[in-house]
């Protein structure tokens, strides 16, 4: 993996899921340099290029969207679609993904996860994390304010984020309804549940948005 903010990546021949009709459904290649998408094009790379190429024919490139963020904090998404200049935060999923799933509850089994990119950093590839969650949590530091319990507005979901890089959820009073590993990247959180799926969320101010839930610190 390239160093932070030093990514040079081309996802080739993916079908793009986008909120912009000019890009939605387009089969093309997406270039990432540093933290941002620099091109959505089928242009060939120059000979000798050091760009990492990910073949993605038959897969869907899905921006990391949250319907609750879009509805409550639209100003926080400079460009919630994969367009040139937008922040490179997306997943590449084998097969198709519906817009509803992308917006409301994107879960991806490891065998379908081709690639996960957050702010231009490759965080998972071929269904596997790039870095162990405990090592990642150690790097984040014990004083990270995101450790602890987050509770949704209806009190249905309590999500417990531990500094060990592990989480568990209490749902409707039932403990350990879901549990697994997680990774923190700026304002993003990436989950790998023990039951066998990847999921994603986003921190906005004092809120954690995930799968249609809006949580606040307990």
Image (spheres, rainbow, N blue to C red):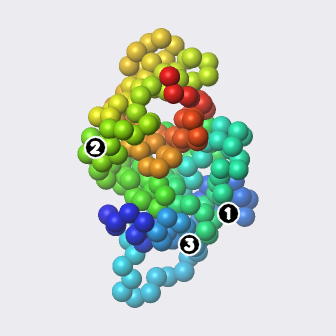
Could you tell whether 111 is left or right of 94 in the image? left
Category of crowding for the residue at label 1, using alpha-carbon neighbours closer than 10 angstroms: few (below 14), some (14–19), many (at least 20): some
Front one among 110 and 181: 181
Pair 1/3: label in front: 3
The disc, 2 or 1, on the residue closer to the chain's N-terminal end is 1
Q: Is the Cβ of the residue at disc 3 closer than 8 Å to that at disc 2?
A: no
Q: Position of residue 180 (x, y in %)?
A: 35, 32
Q: Which mark is residue 23?
A: 1
Residue at 45% from the left image edge and 56% from the top image edge:
117
Quadrant of the image occupied by residue 163: top left
The residue that label 3 is drawn on is 38
Secondary structure under the numbered disc 2 in the rendered image: helix
Q: Which mark is residue 52?
A: none
Vertical side of 117 occupied by 162: above or below: above
Q: Is the Cβ of the residue at disc 1 closer than 8 Å to that at disc 3?
A: no
Pair 2/1: label in front: 2
Distance from label 2 to label 1 (Cα)?
Answer: 39 Å
Q: Position of residue 11 (x, y in %)?
A: 47, 66
Can residue 106 be seen from the camera position used here?
no
Quadrant of the image occupied by residue 166: top left
Secondary structure under the numbered disc 1 in the rendered image: loop
Residue at 69% from the left image edge and 43% from the top image edge:
73
Front one among 16 and 171: 171
Q: Position of residue 45 (x, y in %)?
A: 46, 82
Distance from label 1 to label 3 (Cα)?
Answer: 14 Å
The residue that label 2 is drawn on is 138
């Amino acid at each position: 993996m390239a160093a932070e903010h030093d990514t040079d990546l081309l996802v080739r021949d993916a079908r793009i899921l986008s909120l912009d009709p000019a890009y939605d459904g387009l089969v093309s290649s997406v270039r990432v340099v540093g933290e941002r998408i620099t091109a959505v094009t089928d242009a060939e790379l120059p000979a000798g290029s050091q760009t990492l190429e990910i073949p993605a024919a038959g897969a869907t490139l899905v921006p990391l969207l949250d319907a609750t963020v879009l509805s409550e904090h639209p100003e926080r998404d400079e460009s919630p679609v994969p367009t040139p200049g937008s922040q490179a935060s997306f997943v590449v999923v084998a097969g198709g993904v519906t817009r509803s799933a992308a917006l409301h509850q994107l879960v991806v089994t490891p065998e379908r996860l081709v690639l996960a990119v957050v702010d231009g950093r490759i965080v998972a590839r071929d269904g596997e994390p790039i870095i162990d969650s405990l090592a990642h949590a150690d790097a984040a530091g014990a004083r990270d304010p995101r450790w602890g319990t987050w509770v949704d507005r209806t009190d249905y979901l309590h999500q417990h984020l531990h500094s060990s890089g592990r989480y568990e959820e209490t749902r409707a009073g039932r403990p350990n309804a879901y549990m697994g590993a997680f990774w923190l990247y700026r304002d993003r959180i990436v989950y790998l549940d023990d039951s066998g799926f990847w999921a994603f969320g986003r921190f906005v101010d004092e809120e954690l948005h995930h799968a249609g839930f809006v949580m606040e610190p307990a």
